[in-house]
Image: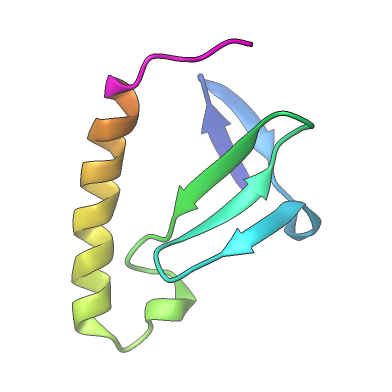
Amino acid sequence: MDVYINQKRVRLRPQQAIGKGGEADVYRLNRTTAVKLFKPPSHPDFEGMVEAQQGARERCGTASAKATAIPPVFA
């Protein structure tokens, strides 16, 4: 799957998955960076689950606002 990070297209492969949960999947981007992708309401895990789909809508909006408020950290 392709995602955009800092306006750059990045391809994430299933082999990069390092964690899966009810609200998001986590992928290893490189040795020092992981990417947490919140599942959208259309994710297959939420098929036929109206409440879960609504929760995903709310999380995606809230997570986006929180992420832009966090300053980047450089080691």
**Which residues are drawn in magenta?**
69-75
Image coordinates for residue 1, horizontal then vertical, percent: 64, 51
Q: Is residue 62 left or right of residue 31?
A: left
In this view, the residue farthest toward the front is 75
Quadrant location of the C terminus in the rendered image: top right
* Relative to 59, residue 53 above or below: below
Q: Is residue 23 left or right of residue 59?
A: right
| Residue occupying the point 19% across, 56% down | 58
* Relative to 58, residue 66 above or below: above
User: Which quadrant of the structure image shows residue 65?
Assistant: top left
Q: Is residue 1 magenta?
A: no
For the image shown, how many numbered marks are present on the structure?
0
Residue 1 shows up from this direction: no
Q: Which of 27 and 48 is in front in this view?
A: 27
| Residue occupying the point 37% across, 79% down | 46
Q: Is residue 52 left or right of residue 42?
A: left
* Relative to 9, residue 42 above or below: below
Image coordinates for residue 25, horizontal then vertical, percent: 54, 58
Q: Does the magenta stretch include residue 73?
A: yes
Question: Coloring scheme of the render?
Answer: rainbow
Residue 17 shows up from this direction: yes
- In terms of secondary structure, what is the magenta stretch mainly? loop
| Residue occupying the point 45% across, 79% down | 45
Image coordinates for residue 68, horizontal then vertical, percent: 31, 24
* Relative to 43, residue 35 above or below: above
In this view, the residue farthest toward the bottom is 48
| Residue occupying the point 29% across, 42% down | 63
